Image: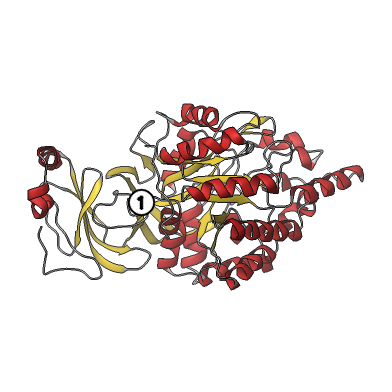
Amino acid sequence: MTFYAALAPPFLLLDFRFGSLLSTAKNATFSSYNFLTLSFLMASLLLKNGRVVTADSDSVCDILIEGETIVSIGRKLAADGAEVIDCTGKIIVPGGIDPHVHLDMPFMGTFSSDTHETGTRAALHGGTTTVIDFVLQKQGHSLREALTEWQGRATGTAVGDYSFHMAVTDFNPGTKEEIKDMVAEGITSFKTFMAYKGALMIDDAQMVGLMQEVKKHGALVTAHATNGDMIDTLIAQHRAQGKLTPLYHYLSQPEVTESEASGRFADIANYTGVNAYIVHLTCEGALNQVRRATERNQRVFVETCIQYLLLDASLYEDEANGAKYVMSPPLREKKDQETLWAGINQGLVQVVGTDHCPFMLAQKLVGKDDFSKIPNGHPAIEHRMELLFSEGVSKGRISLQKFVAVTSTNPARIFGMFPRKGTISIGADADLVVFDPEKKHTISAATHHMNVDYSAYEGWELTGKIDTVLLRGQVAVDGGQTKVGRGYGKFIRRGVTAF
């Protein structure tokens, strides 16, 4: 194992090209040396002179990749025969991890319009190299049946890497027995819905039972935390009064429906002691419930989504276009945006995802005369990182290190992929994003790669553009062109939370 004097702090420069196994030679097996020999035959790639930023470091240096992993980090690295990418003036960050996407998902009588192929391809163009999709158990059916269905959609089709959460919609003795099997297969997070009664929602008794079982295995329970009974009542009242425009989708889910459910979820999680995570948190009231939980020394992980940081409920007043923004929870107020940005900097919000669940305009317009029939969902998988960089980093709302933390490192730690994913370090997957921090560009449905015929950010001018994306050492996107094909994406088996 070789150490270099030209070390670029704070990175520890280790060179595995010439036999990292030598330090443990007495324990090395013949197969280990075969693997080492094989590494010499793998293509090498050298990223030179980039500003390499992780969640806790910032240094101009080089990155040497062999095969799928990073083997050296330092200044003035040399690698004979390696392909060189000059990153002078560019920022290099770990590949993004979006832990909240819904690809090819059955919902409200239709399917979300991005498949695992189109969705992960679009994600790569936006610097997201790994996504975590949601497997939805059907009530009356097993977790295994649901997993098999989703594997049939993703295996051999995904372009980028992916994993699964398991959404438990029917917790019963049979389901309870399946939890350990899911964890053994690398599915270590279990989603609950506190809304969508009769389809996805579980009650508090089932919630307690699920949390107790999940805790036994060191896994994580996540929640769509909104009060479904209250929402259903308000929807029925508005429909009875003939109030059917998209604005009433928003008015049927006031802040209290989210803050109450977030507090209840935190309370139940505190009682059971399970690792807890609230998905797509949107508002001040809900985040205040998390603040209160910290007063009793409880840790509740929080995810918000890019749309809740940038868009607000005034969009629902446009009757012609309001359906585009129908999602659950709905967009909130300006004061909630301020709270969420502050929550990121305070460490109360650890993750920025997307809840990517796109529908074509024709699918959305099924509910043109009744907001309750509009498929809920928002397309953002391709734009999350560039939007957050432009609106967050470039405008001074968050630091570069915080940007990396909430888009990559924190989800990797929370969802059991660190340090394979979510960082730039020796031995990690070479999932890397090369950013031009000054380049300006405009978002448009005419140029995006998502399988949806509108953009919620049409005409937005951004500062900061992704040049090149590497996935496991392979150039996946370069200059706007896809360089890897259908089936290149791998299923990522996950461990338990290490945050």
> On screen, 386 above or below 153?
below
Residue 114 as seen in the image, left or right of residue 471: right
The residue shown at (88%, 47%) is 237
Q: Residue at x 15, y 47 (%)?
A: 82
* Percent x, y of residue 38: 13, 38
Q: Quadrant of residue 201?
A: top right
Question: Is 292 in front, or is 283?
Answer: 292
Question: Which amino acid type is shown beneath numbered disc 1?
Answer: Lys
For residue 351, above or below residue 292: above
Colour scheme in the image?
Answer: secondary structure
Secondary structure of the residue carrying tag 1 is loop
Q: Classify the position of the N terminus by image quarter.
A: bottom left
x then y, percent, for residue 52: 30, 63
Q: Residue at x 51, y 39 (%)?
A: 179
Asked if residue 324 shows in the view, the reply is yes
Q: Which residue is mark 1?
A: 421
Q: Could you say which quadrant of the image residue 62 lies in?
A: bottom left
Percent across and percent down for residue 21 are: 12, 50
> In this rendering, would 177 be left or right of 262?
left
Q: Is residue 227 above or below residue 60?
A: above
- Residue drawn 69% across the image and 30% down it: 109
Residue placed most toward the observer, 486 or 452: 486
Q: Position of residue 110 (x, y in %)?
A: 65, 30
Crowd band around label 1 with a 10 angstrom C-alpha radius: few (<14), some (14–19), many (20+): many
Q: Is residue 15 left or right of residue 69?
A: left
- Which quarter shows the C terminus? bottom left
